[in-house]
Image: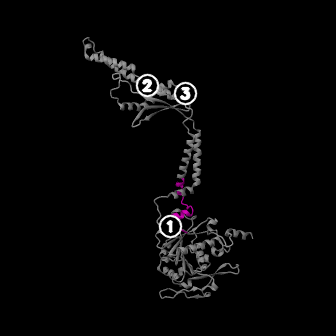
Amino acid sequence: MAEKDTEGLSLGAYLRVVLRWKWLVIVVTLAIAVLGTAYTWTRTPMYSATATLLYVTQIDIADPLGTTFVDKTAQQAEIESVPTVIGSARVRESAEALMEPANVEAGYGVGVTLQPGLNSGYSNIVGIDGTSAKPEAAADAANSYAQAFVEWNRESARAQVADAIDVVQDRIDTYTTEESRQTTEYLSLQQRLQDLQLLEAATQSSFKIITSASVPSAPYEPDKPRGLVLALAAGLVFGVALAFLFEQFDTRVRGEEQVVEELDLPVIAHVPPLGRRGRDGSVLQMLADPAGPAAESYRLLRSNLEFTAVDAPVRTLLISSSLQGEGKSVISCNLAVSMALAGKRVVLVDADLRGPHVHSYMGIPNAKGVSTLMARRDDIKDALVPVRLDASQARNGSIVMTTQTAGDVTRVKMGVASADRSGDWLWPDSDQGAPMLSVLPSGPVPPNPGEIVASTRFADILDVLAKDADIVIVDAPAMLPVGDTAALAPHVDALAYVANPDMLRRPSLEQARVQLGHLPCRILGLVIVANKRGQGYYGYYTADGASSQSRRRVQQRV
């Protein structure tokens, strides 16, 4: 069996998880989409308007032609300070004094957008953004704050020049004598004072309003189409995340595909639900309803097993499952009957010494069997129960099963007896060509069933049975609760694994995959107990062209 890749889920596995929880994903997506859309559509519309400022370098009075060095770092620092200045109380008071009182009462917000430069830093374009639920208030706020900022910038620059004038004037006032006023220093100060006075008169703001904000015609939020798309996307993401979260906590097996994926085994055949019994109360559908879909599924199982054994013949076949109650004993009995009806010499061995069911399904006594053979109280020929499958006149020629005691059966010698065999047994001679099979029941429940199936004597018994039979079918206990299947595996040729998705859980499949990977025998594949009753699983057509289901419906109406 190939090792299962546990590095992660494939895309197909992700899709299967989403499909398994599709209704959860749909409901969550729609719910969040409705809530998000309702929130978007009930929000108050907000309007935005922008006034644009341009940074302009001031003319240097001492160098009006601009031949001196311009400090770009200082310019960028001044541009970067705009958001802080706009948020100051002084600018806010000045702007609100310029705004209409009704617009101030309507409420507004102001932000600053610094346009990025082409290479690095910021460009000389600054946007003053006004927002409000009232479009007129948004435009008024943007324009008023832009104007208030320009005025503050101009006043700030003039205040700096005025401070410099005061400093120079104070210095000039120190020259009190006529002689001191004739010095070069005094004349230089007088020239500097004149330059500063000219600069004060020429100083303007470093920022100019190049575009005034206009009243917006449509709100910038809520964007209803965009809100609907985002709500759908958020709902889908949350729904899928919730599906994967539930998948982690939900250990149920979601159908045959997950069983095959977890165990990494091929499917040999499907069999229908095992809870129904035939008209005679038997679970042997091969006899109770030989023309029904259940019997046909066992014939298909028989054929597929023959194909899997083309390269390496299977003389001993182990039937096991993960848990008790999945139907392995019913499948073992029906498979044995199906092979016997096909003309094979079949021995059915009940190796489930902890909870045997074969004798009950086959309608045979359980006083002798595997446990009495291991205790050496009986030999093989006494413990084996021959079963004849012949036509019954009382049931209009349908196949019935007749259990025969040792004294009523004519036996013929099969093979040559050897001294090292614990007891030579004889195959029952079929009466008038009726198919025969032999059953080795479990016998009375022993106190140490695990040691019995693991013993070399039990392996010798299987070897003896396999020499004179076409196939020995061994019904083993469930693999996960006990270690009997692992103990039996070295003594058989192959194993067919029964899986009922309705009973299994993912941790059980993971544990079964690990244990199956360590068994020394061939793993032929899975027998899926599929509860889908569609014709695609079990339906077949009779010789007259009518399906088995329609044929039964016609018989019921008649």
The residue wearing badge 1 is 512
The answer to which of marks 3 and 1 sits earlier in the sequence is 3
Q: Nearer the viewer's eye, disc 3 or disc 1?
A: 3
Instruction: State whether residue 267 is above or below residue 373.
Output: above
Instruction: State whether residue 265 is above or below residue 73.
Output: below
Instruction: Indicate left or right for 558 with 311 as reference.
Output: right
Q: Amino acid at mark 1?
A: Ala
Q: Give the spatial CA distance, label 3 vs label 1.
A: 75 Å
Magenta stretch holds residue 249 = yes
Visible in this render: residue 359? no
SS type, badge 2: helix
Q: Nearer the viewer's eye, disc 1 or disc 2?
A: 2
Magenta stretch holds residue 312 = no
Image location of residue 278, percent across then percent down: 66, 73
Q: Amino acid at mark 3?
A: Asn
Residue at far top of view = 178
